[in-house]
Image (cartoon, rainbow, N blue to C red):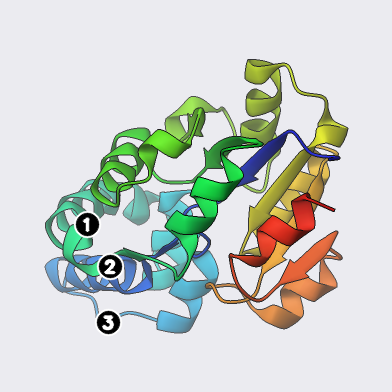
Amino acid sequence: MKYRLLVFDFDGTLADSEESIMESLRLVARDLGLSGLDRSSARRGIGLPLQRTIEMGLGLDPGQASEAVELYRKHYNEVAFDRTCLFPGVKETLDLLQQDFLLAVASSKSRHGLTAMMRHLGIIDRFCFIAGAQDVQQGKPAPDMVLLALRSMNIPADECLVVGDAVYDIEMGRRASVDTCAVTYGNGSVDELHSCNPTFVIDSFAHVVSLVHE
């Protein structure tokens, strides 16, 4: 088998969290007296560092968005656990993969929020490495999270595969010189994903198994 380490994005790849993110942004907009939420722009921002997601979704400048981050985190903690679920086949596929591969998560979520949600969804014990926003100097699409995972587990780049639903995930992997796999069922635009020329494109999470066992 070519790969030893599989690095997964979280939102839109492992977990269907779009509605929890949108509802949190809607509540921030309400608190700030804004006219509303631009769902299309917000969706494109999922996967980027949180402040950038808020800027895109609510049309705020960086100064305003930085003040909204704590509001967002408060509302997210209130609504997310009831509105987030794993995509079909994720838990069963992870059980298969962890028998032969090291599994990691690279997410723009805060480490605390990420691990709490992974524990809630019952998958945290499948992973030997978890990177959140605070663990790196630069978030996606910079390669920092993947490079940190490679260093932490002493894995060469050519034995790693990054799996994600957004162009930011694919660019992160490419900039770390690892192979990439785009999933089409998440938040990202399928056309944009194809334009990034990922190594693989799959339509369901379970298809990861056949890729990595070739």
Residue 213, label in figure: none
Picture quadrant of residue 191 = bottom right
Residue 86 percent location from the top left of the image: 38, 63
Residue type of the residue flagged with mark 3 = Gly
Query: Which corner quadrant of the image does residue 20 belong to?
Result: bottom left
Closer to the chain start, of discs 1 and 2, is: 2
Kind of residue indicated by mark 1: Tyr
In the rendered structure, which amino acid carries the disc numbered 2?
Ser
Which residue is rendered at x = 82% and y = 25% of the image?
Answer: 156
| Pointer 1 local density, CA inside 10 Å: few below 14, some 14–19, many at least 20 | many
Q: Is residue 106 left or right of 37 when viewed as pictured?
A: right
Please name the residue that numbered disc 3 is placed on: 36
- The residue that mark 2 highlights is 20
Which mark sits nearer the N-terminus, 3 or 2?
A: 2
Q: Earlier in the sequence, mark 1 or mark 3?
A: 3
- Give the Cα distance between marks 3 and 2: 16 Å
Q: Is residue 169 above or below residue 135?
A: below
Q: Quadrant of the N terminus?
A: top right
Helix, strand or loop status at disc 1: helix
Which marked residue is nearer to the observer: mark 3 or mark 2?
2
Q: Which residue is mark 1?
A: 76
Neighbour tally class for label 2: few under 14, some 14-19, many 20 plus, Cα within 10 Å:
many
Q: Residue at x 68, y 57 (%)?
A: 209
Residue 60: x %, y % from top left = 39, 64
Q: Is residue 33 left or right of residue 152?
A: left
Mark yes or no: residue 48 visible: no
Q: Secondary structure at mark 2?
A: helix
Q: Position of residue 178 (x, y in %)?
A: 82, 41
Work out whether residue 43 or residue 71 is closer to the camera in this orientation and state it. 43
Residues marked 1 and 2 touching at CB (< 8 Å): yes
Q: Is residue 45 visible?
A: yes
